[in-house]
Image (cartoon, helix red, strand yellow):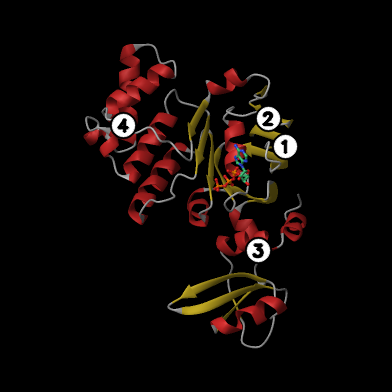
Amino acid sequence: MVRLKIQQLTKTYHSGIKALDNITLNIANGMFGLLGPNGAGKSSLMRTLATLQLPDTGQIFFDGNDIVLNPQQMRNKLGYLPQDFGVYPKISAFDLLNHLAVLKGLQNKNERKEQVLSLLQQTNLFEVRKRAVSTFSGGMRQRFGIAQALLGNPQLIIVDEPTAGLDPQERNRFHDLLSEIGSDRVVILSTHIVEDVNDLCPEMAVMAGGKLILQGKPADLTQKLNGRIWRKIIEKADLSHYSAHHSVISTKIIAGKLNLFVLNDQIPAEGFEAVYPGLEEVYFSSLFNPANQNREAGL
Ligand SMILES: Nc1ncnc2c1ncn2[C@@H]1O[C@H](COP(=O)(O)OP(=O)(O)OP(=O)(O)O)[C@@H](O)[C@H]1O
């Protein structure tokens, strides 16, 4: 069942940059991945959903409520971990979370304490609850960020670029945590890291240049590309030649060799081999040819 309906949302900043260009999106319960390169407009969309900025035009409904007209209604149901959650004071994790819980309107002292301790358990920070948040590692800070986003049992959780800068072990931990909170509410994960979406999200979309260029289930999108991705190991000096003659969606150094990935319905030339596509190929091919992918996704 669709809970979040985003309709024809646009936003142009004073600088003239159109950060949101007619975004329409329906999102049901579960983890939804929003992928896009830097500057795609993801944070602009997240901030708008979090009622921190108004769109120029368009509507957003959550459980039927118009959140542009009634932002306060949304705020009670919202948990937000912004890209730059820069609150790392020298007070303990328990005290800070308790303070944020007060701000979120959790007035009953006992209930509040119970919820704060339970969230510290859930985010694996219980043992360090008396330590100052300022001494936490990047991964611990992000887990604390999720704990504060979960205060008040929100129905819409927005997590903006949460794994940037985390080491693989912390990223896995963070993935485990996100996967536990996802099924009975809407969780939107905005990221430029394909693996995040691959690991966690049954539904996803890609944004670029303020537009929504692709939407669907990762497995379906990958399946649609089957037989159309080709790889060749080339010399660096030949890259411009290949780029001029083929639809090069990405290049990658693997074991010190330059691998070229090309989108084509047939084998593009001698020496190419077919590659079974993953979400990375879906992502890069959508960025390579947005118009084409829009058509394919039936948008
Ligand atoms: N407050 C602002 N004022 C003016 N321009 C802005 C503002 N916020 C974002 N932009 C511009 O809008 C475009 C979209 O930015 P946004 O931060 O939404 O993208 P993003 O996909 O989240 O990228 P990133 O991962 O780099 O944050 C960019 O060109 C950015 O420079």
Residue type, mark 1 in image: Thr
Could you tell which of marks 1 and 2 lies nearer the N-terminus?
1
**Residue 120 tag number:** 4
Disc 2 C-beta below 8 A from ligand 1 = no
Q: Circle 1 sits in a helix, a strand or a loop, which is it?
A: strand
Residue type, mark 2 in image: Ile
Q: Name the residue under label 3.
A: 285
Task: Check the image and name the residue furthest to the front.
Answer: 15
Q: Distance between the residues labelled 3 and 1?
A: 25 Å
User: Looking at the rendering, which quadrant does residue 222 occupy?
Assistant: bottom right
Vertical order, 250 against 117 (above or below): below
Residue type, mark 4 in image: Leu
**Residue 201 tag number:** none
Say which of marks 3 and 4 sits in front. Answer: 3
Q: Name the residue under label 2.
A: 60
Could you tell which of marks 1 and 4 lies nearer the N-terminus?
1
Q: Distance between the residues labelled 3 and 4?
A: 41 Å
Say which of marks 1 and 4 sits in front. Answer: 1
Q: Mark 1 points at which residue?
A: 10
* Residue nearer the viewer, 238 or 103: 238
Q: In this view, does 227 lie to the left or right of 181?
A: right
